[in-house]
Image (cartoon, rainbow, N blue to C red):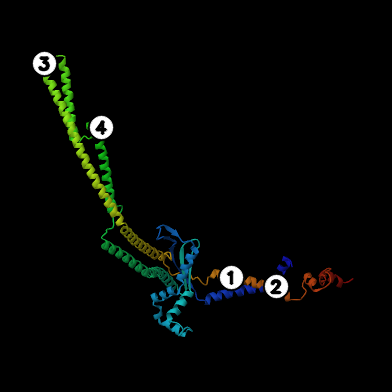
């Protein structure tokens, strides 16, 4: 069937199309007149998907935004939030609501609060705006003020419920960690008590960090012994070489005296050498200078001998000191060996105390981190816009209803017209004949029209010949 044939059919059955279209429009108008209006109010909240990691302290995002949004939508539509709205608005005390509940089939099977909550949830529609983190809580009611009231109540109840869930999870986490922390504290107290008892029994103190008294004493004795042996070697070398140089020991009084005598000797020798060219060999002054020079040399010899005697005494003193230090070193080494087991046991007890303390601190940090993390189950929700009573009903919408009625009327009229044409078996055109007859179509004989005689010709035929 061609488009022209379809148009011809619709033209013949135009009255069906027009009648169906008018019926659809009139029916839609009647429905809008007798259907009560439904108003939809919207309250919005901003949801922050970020949170601070309690362990690292860095800001992080939830891995799945859909999961986070789904959790929040489930929270808003939960029975807990709906019951909170019933309690906030005191709906269970409304006489009209109580009367409706008694007439319902739920009377006697559930409480009035749950019945009201289920009724409210049927008109609730929480969604997230596309591409944003804005929660849109829509509520539909016959009255615009009622719709805005319930939308705002659901928003406030959802925010409070999220905060309550965070606090409940934190308390649950604290209850889970509490016995573990108590056990660790008891173990730490036992370790500290064992350390204190051992120190009191063995009369041994815990060395400060980086310092062990026994070892420090042993090392100090070793240092003194090394210094004494070095001094002994120096004194023995000086005695063997009979050195009188002041640079060997500037603080040695014997060397200082010898240095002074050497300066006097050099001065006296210079005076004698100067006087030789002026005075005779037997001159009294020259004799006196030679005698003075000889006296200085005797003093140097005596001072040198006293220095050697003093060196020998100092060598004996140092040797005695070395022997004493060696004895002290042996005793310190023996004492060090004797207390080695005690020190090892003390170190073991100290390590046990440190281990228990570290274990307790780590578990306390884990408990605190878990408390903080439990508060991040739901993202931060902040009320953005309060719902206001809508001015235009969300249903029915006149333009949408008329457009749907016109489209449905045209489609139904088209179907009815085609059905009527298919049910009509009368032949009206050559196409109908093709479908009705088995033979081929040859042509059409138009209907002959009766001819009317012209008035002038009739009058002439009635006149005289």
Q: Nearer the viewer, residue 77 or 225?
A: 225
24 on left or right of 310: right
Farthest right residue in view: 465
Residues at discs 2 and 3 in contact (Cβ within 8 Å): no
Which badge, 4 or 1, comes first in the chain's sequence? 4
Real-space Cα distance between discs 4 and 3? 40 Å
At a point 31% along the width and 56% down the height, the residue shown is 340
Q: Which residue is mark 3?
A: 283
Classify 10 Å Cα crowding around label 2: few (below 14), some (14-19), many (20 and above). some
Picture quadrant of residue 367: bottom left
| Label 4, residues with CA under 10 Å away: few <14, some 14-19, many ≥20 | few
- The answer to whether residue 212 is seen in the rendering is no
Comes first in the chain, label 2 or label 1: 1
Between 391 and 286, the residue placed more toward the observer is: 286
Q: Which mark is residue 241?
A: 4
Lower position in the chain sequence, tag 4 or tag 3: 4
- Label 1: which residue? 404
Q: Which mark is residue 227?
A: none
Nearer to us in this view, 257 or 156: 257
The span from disc 4 to disc 1 (Cα, nearest Å) is: 130 Å
Give the spatial CA distance, label 2 vs label 3.
174 Å
Secondary structure category for the residue under label 2: helix
Check whether the beta carbons of the residues at disc 2 and disc 1 lie within 8 A of each other. Answer: no
Distance, label 1 to label 3, CA atoms, is 159 Å
Which label sits in the foreground, 1 or 3?
3
Identify residue for label 2: 418
Q: Position of residue 83 (x, y in %)?
A: 42, 76
Quarter of the rendering containing residue 161? bottom left
Mark 1 / mark 3, whichever is N-terminal:
3
> Of tags 2 and 3, which is closer to the observer?
3
């Amino acid at each position: 069937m061609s488009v022209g044939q379809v148009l011809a059919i619709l033209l013949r059955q135009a009255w069906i199309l027009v009648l169906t279209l008018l019926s659809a429009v009139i029916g839609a108008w009647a429905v809008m007149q007798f259907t009560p209006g439904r108003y939809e109010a919207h309250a919005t909240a901003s949801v922050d998907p970020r949170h601070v990691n309690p362990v690292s302290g860095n800001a992080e995002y939830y891995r799945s935004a859909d999961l986070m949004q789904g959790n929040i939508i489930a929270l808003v539509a939960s029975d807990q939030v709906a019951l909170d709205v019933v309690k906030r608005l005191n709906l269970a005390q409304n006489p009209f609501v109580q009367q409706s509940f008694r007439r319902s089939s739920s009377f006697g099977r559930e409480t009035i609060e749950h019945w009201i909550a289920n009724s409210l949830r049927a008109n609730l529609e929480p969604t997230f705006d596309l591409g944003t983190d804005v929660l849109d809580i829509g509520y539909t009611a016959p009255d615009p003020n009622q719709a805005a009231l319930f939308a705002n109540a659901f928003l406030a109840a959802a925010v409070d419920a999220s905060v309550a869930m965070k606090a409940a999870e934190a308390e649950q986490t604290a209850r889970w960690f509490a016995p573990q922390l108590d056990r660790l504290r008891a173990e730490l107290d036992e370790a500290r008590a064992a350390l204190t008892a051992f120190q009191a029994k063995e009369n041994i103190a815990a060395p400060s960090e980086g310092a062990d008294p026994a070892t420090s004493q042993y090392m100090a004795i070793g240092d003194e012994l090394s210094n004494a042996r070095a001094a002994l070697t120096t004194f023995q070398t000086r005695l063997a070489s009979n050195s009188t140089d002041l640079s060997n020991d500037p603080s040695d009084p014997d060397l200082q005296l010898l240095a002074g005598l050497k300066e006097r000797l050099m001065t006296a020798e210079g005076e004698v050498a100067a006087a030789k060219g002026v005075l005779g060999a037997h001159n009294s002054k020259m004799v006196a200078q030679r005698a003075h020079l000889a006296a200085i040399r005797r003093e140097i010899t005596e001072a040198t001998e006293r220095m050697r005697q003093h060196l020998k005494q100092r060598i004996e003193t140092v040797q005695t000191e070395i022997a004493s230090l060696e004895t002290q070193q042996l005793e310190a080494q023996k004492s060090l060996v004797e207390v080695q087991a005690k020190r090892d046991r003390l170190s073991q007890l100290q390590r046990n105390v440190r281990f228990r303390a570290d274990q307790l601190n780590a578990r306390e940090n884990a408990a605190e981190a878990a408390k903080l993390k439990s508060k991040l189950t739901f993202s931060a929700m902040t009320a953005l816009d309060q719902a206001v009573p809508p001015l235009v009903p969300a249903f029915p919408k006149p333009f949408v209803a008329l457009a749907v009625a016109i489209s449905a009327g045209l489609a139904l009229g088209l179907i009815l017209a085609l059905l009527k044409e298919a049910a009509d078996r009368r032949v009206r055109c050559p196409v109908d004949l093709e479908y009705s007859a088995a033979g081929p179509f040859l042509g059409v004989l138009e209907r002959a029209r009766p001819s009317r005689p012209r008035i002038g010709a009739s009058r002439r035929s009635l006149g005289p010949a």
